[in-house]
């Protein structure tokens, strides 16, 4: 494992200056943008408003200028009329003034005033007919001064009528003499309300006001007049507000706009103005800035709303991003500290913690791994995993790794790893996948724990628990375990095994005479001797003291064969133990008594079996020691006898103890129609051994092959003898399945026929139905091969096996032999009779000859002959006779005998029974 390196400390980006800076930048940007936008839009709104109001002032100026022009022209007309009609200066036709006043009802008090201010005439009738003087009135004086300066028309500042109390605009026109000197002034008053009607329909904005401001600083008109202002306040005072100050300062410019605090209302207003073309008056529209702002707000509020949304969104996004960063920071911090902790744990762990990539190259290696496996980190890293995996465990390892590659974990398995010095170390191993963020397996980690000490302890415990300390052999516990398993298996497979209980004879004496140590050595020697005798699957155990047990399973498939093998094994054990040996140069001999029990029997338990063998061993001790005893009563004798028979049968052929007997078969007329050869064993001590005793032994031991060959030889020789004597009697011999199935059976038969010169057609091979069951195909082809040599086939003991027309049809058969058990049942037993009839009918149907075996009574003969049986064989006709003697007897008889042959001297009395007719 690479050493943990100190990583630079993590800083929380969500609380750092950069985060604050980011927020600040956003806010500043938005503020800057907002300001610029505000200024820009405000300016736009202002420009638009100014443009809009300017259009209105332009129109207003034209119409008011025109209107005043009309008034001026009208008054000019009056003055011309007065001048032209005056015979001399000052002698004016005052009626013209009155008539003019009557024609212009919109004008209040049309009058003519002399230059001193004395009213000469006034259009409106005065109550007392007195004409006042206005010579002291400021606006008269101002007008006269202006007219003296050459101005003809003066639109004076508003005044309140002395009589009407109405505020009016004085219009004055100069009446001059022939020299152009001012002589009189024609006056008319225009009510300010009349002027206001001009503006009522003007397209100006709500809360805006429109008006006319004279260069003298007095308003000529204003619409509307705010409710808190009296006409005197509006028209009677000289203006001091921003507009007038601006006009004054700018020397009354033609047009323009200015902003400032208004005198009326005291509000900050935008003033747009245009000077009348022909009069010293400026038309203005004044609009409170609040109205402008309102319009501006109306224009921009959607944008501000969107902007606010944007800002809110940005701040929210930034807040979320900050939170994310914080979470990430915390996660990283946790991961970092977990990593540090893990690295420390890995570093200090006693376990080997290693990892490798998917190609099996080692990627990390902790000090624990160095301690456990001897390789330093630098020696191990980059090396293949095989460095530490024993080659015989590579397949296991590959299996584990393929599971881990699928994402599984392999937990706490016990295995071994290679140390640098080549030792194998027992380890407990857990393997886990190392996955990337997406869960893909990128590597594999191994945690290896040294379990050598535990294994050694387990081993020691196991040895103590299951092995005998002195001899190292399995002890009683282990024996009982194995016995239980073996017994189960034997019961399942139905194979016979044996348990041999061995107790050394007089072992106590060894201890007493030579000491315990020598006694121990003797026990070890016995253990070694027994171990050497063991075959695969067999167990020898020491129960304690001088008691040993040999467990030998699967000695045979049946009791007889199992028992005889067990007996041989036990004899061998006894023999070997009885062999003299040396200990420290001293010769020793000892013997042992053996008890033998076979299994499985019924519900035998391991304890039963051990007790039985023990009991048998005590019998052996009681019988004089150095011997063996079977637990089963009578079995020993039986087995011993059978073993002896096996040995003796092997000698029977070379010692010419076998004989061939012959039993003739007769046809319905009592003529010899054939003969069956029967094997007899004439034992020197046992006398005549019956075939049912030695044939099974021969079958089991394989001696049947040799016996079969001998019989075939003899039969052929006999056949040749018969033919030499002019007899064609066919001879039947029994062929055992084992003999028939020899791979070279056909060749052997062929060779014997050739050797002896016997004709194949003189031989009938009797086979049992059992032969036909296994591998029918092979049987058929072999029979056909033999049939080609002329040999015919007969099914022996027909009816006791698996009769089936299927195979009967397929076989090259010559005859069927009805088993004696059915023949004996005829004609009395209806079942037997029915079976025999059925066989006869079937044989007839298949065209086969039928021979009835075991015919003993005339009633049977009568039944069989009447039922169509072809040949009869049995004691009623002839007992088995030594074959060569029979041959001689046959040769001596005249040919074509009508009656069955006389039985030879040694035959039984039954053979003398007269033949059936
Ligand atoms: N040397 C030695 N002797 C042992 C050990 N365990 C038991 N013995 C002795 O073995 C002897 C067993 O004797 P037995 O089998 O009862 O009697 P025996 O002398 O063999 O006589 P038989 O069995 O009747 O032929 C006893 O004297 C035990 O003390 C051992 O581990 N070592």
Image (cartoon, rainbow, N blue to C red):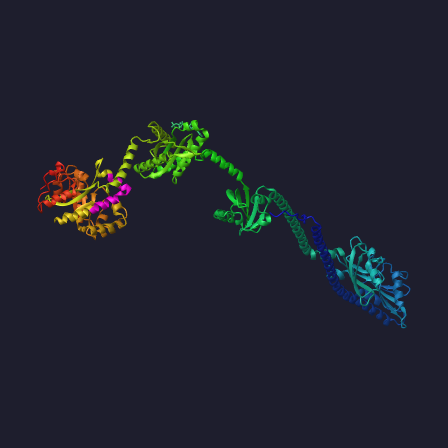
Residue 672 position (above or below residue 599): below
In the image, taking residue 315 as reference, residue 704 lies left or right, namely: left
Q: Which residues are magenta?
A: 694-713
Percent x, y for residue 542? Answer: 42, 33
Residue 132 position (above or below residue 494): below
Percent x, y for residue 462? Answer: 47, 35
Image quadrant containing the C terminus: top left
Q: Nearer the viewer, residue 878 or 191?
A: 878
In the image, taking residue 310 as reference, residue 723 lies left or right, namely: left
In the image, taking residue 890 as reference, residue 289 lies left or right, namely: right
Counting the numbered discs, the total is 0
Magenta region, main secondary structure: helix
- Kindly tell me whether residue 185 is visible in this rendering: yes
Residue at 82% across / 70% down in the picture? 77
In the image, taking residue 277 as reference, residue 530 lies left or right, namely: left
Q: Nearer the viewer, residue 631 or 888?
A: 888
Percent x, y for residue 441? Answer: 54, 50
In the rendered image, residue 710 lying in the magenta stretch gets the answer: yes
């Amino acid at each position: 494992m690479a050493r943990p390196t100190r990583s630079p400390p993590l800083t929380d980006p969500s609380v750092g200056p950069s985060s604050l800076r980011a927020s600040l930048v956003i806010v500043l940007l938005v503020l800057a943008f907002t300001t610029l936008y505000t200024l820009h839009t405000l300016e736009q709104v202002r420009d638009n408003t100014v443009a809009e109001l300017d259009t209105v002032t332009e129109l207003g100026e034209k119409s008011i200028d025109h209107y005043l022009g009309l008034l001026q022209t009208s008054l000019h007309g009056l003055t011309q009329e007065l001048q032209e009609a005056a015979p001399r200066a000052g002698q004016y036709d005052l009626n013209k003034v009155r008539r003019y006043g009557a024609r212009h009802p919109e004008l209040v008090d049309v009058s003519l005033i002399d230059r001193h201010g004395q009213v000469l005439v006034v259009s409106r009738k005065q109550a007392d007919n007195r004409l006042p003087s206005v010579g002291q009135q400021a606006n008269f004086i101002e007008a006269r001064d202006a007219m003296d300066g050459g101005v003809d028309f003066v639109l004076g500042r508003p005044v309140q009528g002395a009589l009407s109390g109405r505020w009016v605009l004085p219009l004055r026109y100069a009446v001059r003499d022939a020299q152009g000197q001012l002589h009189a002034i024609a006056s008319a008053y225009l009510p300010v309300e009349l002027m206001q009607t001009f503006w009522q329909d003007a397209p100006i904005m709500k809360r805006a006001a429109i008006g006319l401001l004279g260069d003298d600083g007095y308003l000529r008109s204003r619409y509307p007049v705010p409710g808190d202002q009296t006409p005197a306040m509006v028209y009677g005072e000289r203006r001091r507000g921003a507009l007038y100050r601006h006009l004054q300062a700018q020397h009354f410019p033609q047009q323009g706009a200015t902003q400032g605090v208004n005198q009326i209302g005291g509000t900050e207003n935008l003033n747009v103005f245009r000077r009348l073309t022909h009069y010293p008056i400026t038309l203005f529209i004044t609009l409170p800035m609040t109205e402008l702002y309102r319009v501006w707000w109306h224009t921009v509020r959607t944008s501000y709303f969107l902007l606010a949304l944007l800002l809110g969104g940005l701040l929210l996004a930034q807040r979320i991003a900050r939170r994310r960063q914080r979470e990430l920071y915390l996660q990283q911090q946790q991961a970092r500290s977990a990593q540090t902790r893990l690295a420390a744990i890995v570093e200090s762990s006693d376990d080997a913690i290693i990892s490798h990539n998917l190609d099996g190259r080692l990627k990390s290696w902790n000090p624990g791994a160095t301690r456990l496996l001897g390789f330093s980190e630098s020696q191990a890293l980059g090396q293949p995993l095989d460095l530490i995996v024993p080659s015989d465990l590579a397949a296991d390892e590959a299996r584990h790794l393929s599971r881990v590659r699928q994402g599984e974990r392999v937990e706490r398995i016990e295995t071994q790893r290679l140390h640098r010095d080549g030792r194998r170390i027992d380890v407990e191993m857990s393997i886990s996948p190392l996955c990337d963020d997406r869960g893909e397996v990128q590597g594999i980690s191994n945690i290896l724990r040294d379990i050598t000490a535990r294994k050694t302890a387990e081993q020691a415990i196991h040895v103590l628990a299951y092995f005998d300390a002195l001899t190292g052999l399995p002890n009683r516990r282990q024996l009982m375990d194995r016995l239980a398993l073996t017994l189960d298996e034997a019961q399942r497979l139905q194979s016979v095994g044996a348990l041999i209980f061995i107790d050394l004879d007089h072992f106590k004496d060894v201890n007493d005479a030579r000491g315990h140590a020598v006694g121990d050595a003797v026990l070890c020697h016995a253990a070694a001797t027994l171990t050497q005798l063991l075959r695969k699957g067999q167990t020898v155990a020491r129960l304690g003291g001088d008691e040993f047990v040999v467990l030998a399973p699967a000695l045979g498939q049946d009791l007889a064969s199992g028992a005889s093998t067990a007996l041989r094994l036990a004899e061998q054990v006894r023999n070997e133990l009885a062999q003299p040996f040396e200990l420290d140069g001293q010769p020793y001999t000892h013997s042992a008594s053996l008890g033998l029990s076979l299994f499985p029997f019924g519900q035998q338990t391991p304890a039963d079996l051990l007790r039985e063998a023990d009991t048998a061993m005590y019998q052996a001790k009681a019988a004089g020691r150095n011997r063996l005893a079977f637990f089963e009563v009578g079995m020993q004798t039986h087995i011993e006898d059978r073993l002896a028979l096996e040995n003796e049968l092997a000698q029977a052929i070379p010692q010419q103890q076998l004989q061939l007997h012959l039993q003739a078969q007769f046809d319905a007329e009592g003529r010899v129609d054939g003969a069956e050869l029967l094997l007899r064993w004439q034992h020197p001590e046992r006398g005549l051994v019956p075939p049912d005793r030695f044939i099974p032994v021969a079958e089991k031991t394989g001696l049947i092959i040799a016996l079969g060959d001998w019989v075939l030889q003899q039969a052929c020789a006999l056949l040749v003898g018969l033919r030499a004597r002019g007899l064609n009697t066919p001879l039947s011999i029994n062929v055992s399945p084992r003999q028939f199935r020899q791979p070279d059976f056909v060749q052997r038969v062929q060779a014997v026929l050739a050797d002896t010169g016997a004709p194949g057609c003189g031989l009938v091979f009797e086979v049992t139905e059992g032969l036909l069951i296994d591998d029918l195909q092979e049987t058929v082809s072999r029979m056909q091969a033999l049939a080609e040599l002329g040999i015919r086939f007969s099914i022996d003991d027909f009816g006791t096996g698996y009769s089936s027309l299927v195979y009967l049809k397929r076989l090259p058969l010559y005859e069927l032999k009805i088993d004696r058990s059915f023949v004996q049942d005829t004609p009395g037993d209806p079942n037997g009779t029915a079976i025999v009839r059925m066989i006869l009918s079937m044989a007839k149907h298949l065209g086969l000859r039928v021979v009835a075996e075991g015919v003993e009574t005339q009633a049977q003969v009568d039944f069989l002959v009447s039922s169509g049986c072809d040949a009869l064989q049995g004691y009623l006709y002839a007992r088995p006779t030594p074959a060569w003697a029979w041959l001689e007897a046959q040769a001596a008889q005249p040919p074509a005998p009508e009656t069955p042959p006389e039985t030879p001297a040694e035959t039984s009395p039954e053979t003398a029974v007269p033949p059936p007719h």
